[in-house]
Image (spheres, grey):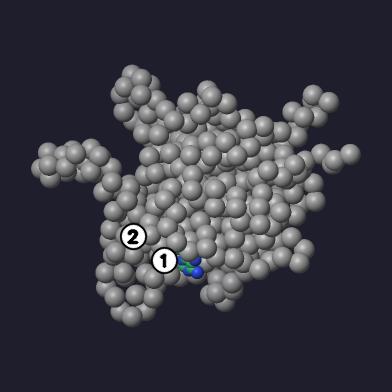
Amino acid sequence: MTATPSRVLVLNSGSSSLKYQLLDMESGARLAVGLVERIGEETSRLKHTPLTAGGGEAREVNGPIADHDAALKAVAGELARDGMGPDSPELAAIGHRVVHGGMFFTEPTVVDDAVLAEIERLIPVAPLHNPANLTGIRTAMALRPDLPQVAVFDTAFHTTMPESAARYAIDVKTADEHRIRRYGFHGTSHAYVSRKAAELLGKAPEEVNLIVLHLGNGASASAVRGGRCVDTSMGLTPLEGLVMGTRSGDVDPAVIFHLMRVGNMSADEIDVLLNQKSGLVGLCGDNDMREIRRRIDEGDEEARLAFDIYIHRLKKYIGAYYAVLGRVDAVVFTAGVGENAAPVREAAVAGLEELGLAVDGELNSVRSDEPRLISPEYARVAVAVVPTDEELEIARQTYALVHDSASRND
Ligand SMILES: Nc1ncnc2c1ncn2[C@@H]1O[C@H](COP(=O)(O)OP(=O)(O)O)[C@@H](O)[C@H]1O
Ligand SMILES: CC(=O)OP(=O)(O)O
Ligand SMILES: [Mg+2]
């Protein structure tokens, strides 16, 4: 008799990357993790790490990987080399991060034709993400047509926002006709990190008010009251809000008409400008915070100004969400920049002592994969670093969905 399949493969397809993990949900073991970077370029790189007993040696494959379909097939090949390929009978489901779920998807959802069509319809409001998510799902379906493919939406956590935060102050009829409202993104991360932060504070999620700062290549802030999102910085699309690696975040909307009328740019050109050629890369030519800090240390003024603009925006959102929440228990940093860039954390909180916020230099400089406090004991509001794990959260939600429905049918 074969055991009930208990493994979940999670795919997190970004605009030019594919992150993945294979987990066993009964034992809790992480069996493999990996990343394909720079998809579509000549210098693509697949880094695969098997974590089964005796494994653990990372393997790298360098060379062009044209698209997400090719990336996933390469990943399937690496998993198969370790005897954990997608054809494995132990696999219970494949979980997919889907960035835009629009108005309808508030829960993890088993993908069928109607779900695929809705994700496709939402491409104009997540042009960097939904196409990659769709390709990932379609390729995974072709590899394992018999398995449930589960979509876990970035937007789901934000559906609790009150109308006063979710609506833009534009003509209601036009907004309703085009479903224009604030959807918010990175929700799986904001939800996971909020729960972990409450745990770190020794409280139940319902008891704490948090400002969560997810600072990766894309970046967003959330105000979370008692475990529920009450405001977030990304909007109709993942372009609004904080300064990001390649995205501008907030601009006066009139910048767009001005560029159309006076700069003779098309809507598509402006889309590319604001989504791909702005943010840190537009300001100083680099979108990696490590490189920006290195340049600042060498006295580079352009990198310094880019950093200052990034921090200024971040600080404005901390202030805004402090006011939205009224009382804050912790400001929580997460994702690539938030977890690793001590200077960003220090600068974002600098000067906010009157709000009860401070960072302890020594605690802030500790490098660790564990959730940790970086505020001094006297501070009224905690400042924390909580590593995110979108893949684990997606795996849990995926397994809960397929497992619960399987037990109902037993
Ligand atoms: N050691 C580090 N110091 C500063 N920044 C870092 C470090 N490691 C990673 N980063 C930043 O994290 C970013 C990637 O974050 P991540 O959350 O993985 O983003 P995404 O999921 O959007 O690809 C990099 O672009 C880089 O700016
Ligand atoms: C929604 C979003 O911006 O995602 P990422 O940070 O992965 O680009
Ligand atoms: Mg990310």
**How many discs appear?**
2
- State the residue in front, 358 or 9: 9
Residue depicted at x 74% and y 28%: 405
Task: Tell me the residue that label 2 is attached to.
Answer: 280
Q: Quadrant of residue 5?
A: top right
Residue depicted at x 29% and y 54%: 278
Q: Is residue 385 left or right of residue 181?
A: right
Question: Ligand 1: does it lie within 8 Å of the C-beta at label 1?
Answer: yes
Residue depicted at x 39% and y 25%: 179
Q: Position of residue 324 (x, y in %)?
A: 48, 43
The answer to whether residue 269 is visible is yes
Q: Is residue 213 left or right of residue 305?
A: right
Q: Quadrant of residue 307?
A: bottom left
Q: Is residue 1 left or right of residue 231?
A: right
The answer to whether residue 352 is visible is no
- State the residue in front, 213 or 248: 248
- State the residue in front, 287 or 57: 57
Task: Tell me the residue that label 1 is attached to.
Answer: 289
Q: Are marks 2 and 1 in contact (CB under 8 Å)?
A: yes
Residue depicted at x 54% and y 52%: 74
Q: Position of residue 410 (x, y in %)?
A: 83, 26
Looking at the rendered structure, the kind of residue marked 1 is Met
